[in-house]
Every structure is written in C-alpha cells, then in structure tokens.
Image: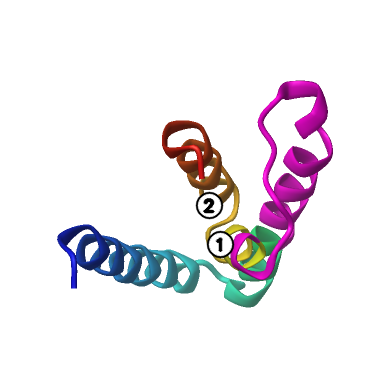
Amino acid sequence: MSILRTCMIIGGCVYALCALVFLFRTKKPLRNLLLSAAIGLSALLLVHFTGPLTGVGLPLNPWSALCSAAAGIPGVLLLLAMRIVWLI
C-alpha cells in the first residue's frame, strides 16, 4: 500500500473519531449530524450547479455525496481543493 493511501486512511479515521466526539458532546447529536449532512449536500449541489459559471465544478456521484455528507462543508472544500490542485 502506498504511503499516500495509508496517510489518507489514517487521516480519515482521525477525522471520523474527532467528528463523533464533537457530535456526542452536544445535547442533540443526531440532529447535529443530520444538519451537518444536509448542509454538506447542499454545498455540493451549489458547487455542482455553479460550476459552469466558476469554471470549477464537482460531479454528483456516490463518492462525492458520501464525502460531503460525512464531512459537511469541510468535505466539499476538500473535494474542491483536490479538484483544483490535482485536476481530478
């Protein structure tokens, strides 16, 4: 397994653990989780539909939807950064 893939897996696990800790520290974790997922998916749709105007768009596929739903706005920003930097 490559070093980059290993780092991405470890980073994803650390992010998931931190997100769960912060979600369960609130009084209503399920509501916050669903709200974060809805905001992330809305941001993904906004970036997708404004792509022709800005020149940088994100495709709507299961992986981008999962990333934006799991991480919210930071997930969409990460997808945009990957799209811009690595031309994925």
Q: Is residue 34 magenta?
A: no
Distance between mark 1 and mark 2 Cα atoms:
6 Å
- Residue 36 placement (x, y as % from top left): 64, 59
- Residue 75 badge: 2
The image quadrant of residue 64 is bottom right
- Taking depth in this image into account, of 78 and 53 the one nearest to the observer is 53
Q: Is residue 23 left or right of residue 16?
A: right
Residue at the disc numbered 1: 67
* Dot 2: element: helix
Which stretch did the figure color magenta?
Answer: 38-64
- Taking depth in this image into account, of 39 and 78 the one nearest to the observer is 78
- Taking depth in this image into account, of 8 and 70 the one nearest to the observer is 8
Q: Is residue 67 left or right of residue 39?
A: left
Q: Callout 1: 10 Å neighbours few (<14), some, many (20+)?
A: many
The image quadrant of residue 5 is bottom left
Q: Is residue 26 left or right of residue 61?
A: left
What's the residue type where badge 2 is placed? Gly
Q: Callout 2: 10 Å neighbours few (<14), some, many (20+)?
A: many
78 vs 11: above or below:
above
Q: Is residue 50 magenta?
A: yes
Q: Is residue 25 left or right of residue 37?
A: left
Q: Main secondary structure of the magenta part?
A: helix
Label pair 1/2, CB-CB below 8 angstroms: yes
What's the residue type where badge 1 is placed? Cys
Decide which of tag 1 and tag 2 comes sooner along the chain.
1
- Residue 14 placement (x, y as % from top left): 28, 66
Quadrant location of the N terminus in the rendered image: bottom left
Q: Residue at x 56, y 62 (%)?
A: 67
